[in-house]
Image (spheres, rainbow, N blue to C red):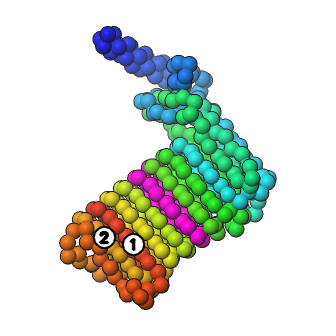
Amino acid sequence: MRGKINAVLIILVLAGICMMFAGFTGGAKTSFYVDRSGIHLDESNGGAKVGFFQPGRASSGDAIEIKNDDLPRFNSVEAELIDMDIILEVSPFYGIELRYDEMRDISWEIRNEKLTVVDNTTKKGVSFAFGFFFGQSQKTYLIVRAPKDALNEITAKTVSGKIEISGFVSQKIYATTVSGNISAKSTEAGSLKTASVSGRISASDISAREFECETASGRIELSGFFAERATTKSVSGKISANIDAAPGEYLVKLSTVTGSARIDGRKITFAERSETKTIGEGGNAKYSWSSTTVSGGIDLTFR
């Protein structure tokens, strides 16, 4: 029985290779997708796309583009996508712009003054495509536009896409990725929380009451930054921050296993591994800062 299964798998792989080269020589794009009803081959006219399988993505070649700059008012945004970029930018009007592959199932709505955008593709099946492309793959993205003070809450989640948030004044902002970078600029928030596994997290010209930032291997880069309570954590990624406050205003707690730590260029020594080093006078400090790593370095600079 096992031998028959292996034989079938070999035949499928060889068939895939044949389809790949047929698509290349014949000028057709070759992909297939899997859903509850079985395996389906998709061949459409156009340039060849040749390569290895990419789970969760199928390219039929045509992109769906939606743009509407005359949406009704909304005061919160929740976007949950897979590999699309998520960009939020300030505008005098309420708008949305989407560009995605036609094989995707993207839904969006405004209900109770909340804009929700969701990628439902993985709920309906798993798609595969030859993704070692000749030529550039199509860029897919979501752009949300709203006035500066309009959005009370922003939630942005994507796996491999990037997230960019710029210019807003919000009560709560939450952004998370697996491998995509996260960037926040010229933003004020009551609570600003970001998290990524391997993506870089950067923030500039930021003011927040509460700031939380966590990565595994991605770098954390903060500049022109101020938060009343800040917590930054990383496993192997470096944490660097240019803090817009005097050092005496902060109670700073640093902890690292094998990484190094510096404040204003001065190296901080630890008596033992995983020791938490407290700097500043707790009774006089207005604000608090905590940075923790395993092997990543910590570099803080105050005004």
Q: Which residue is mark 2?
A: 255
Q: Nearer the viewer, residue 230 or 54?
A: 230
Report the residue marked by disc 1: 290
The magenta stretch spans residue 189? yes
Mark 1: amino acid: Ser
- Quadrant showing the N terminus: top left
Compared with residue 82, is residue 73 higher up or lower down, i.e. above or below? Answer: below
- Amino acid on which disc 2 is placed: Ser
Residue at 67 percent across and 37 percent down: it is 64
**CB of mark 1 within 8 Å of CB of mark 2?**
yes
Residue 137 horizontal side relative to residue 282, left or right: right
Instruction: Specify the segment rendered in magenta.
Output: 179-204
- Quarter location, residue 139: top right
Query: Which residue, as the protein is rendered here, is positioned at the far front?
Result: 283
Mark nearer the N terminus (1 vs 2):
2
Q: Position of residue 40 (x, y in %)?
A: 54, 19
User: Residue 284 in the image: x percent, y percent?
Assistant: 43, 89
Q: For mark 1, give the secondary structure.
A: strand
**Is residue 278 in view?**
yes
Residue 115 placement, left or right of 54: right
The residue positioned 64% from the left and 69% from the top of the image is 169
How far across and down, in percent of the image, does residue 27 sit?
54, 23
Mark 1 neighbour density, 10 Å: few (under 14) some (14–19) many (20 or more): some
- Tell me, yes or no, whether the highlighted magenta stretch contains residue 147: no
Dominant secondary structure, magenta: strand
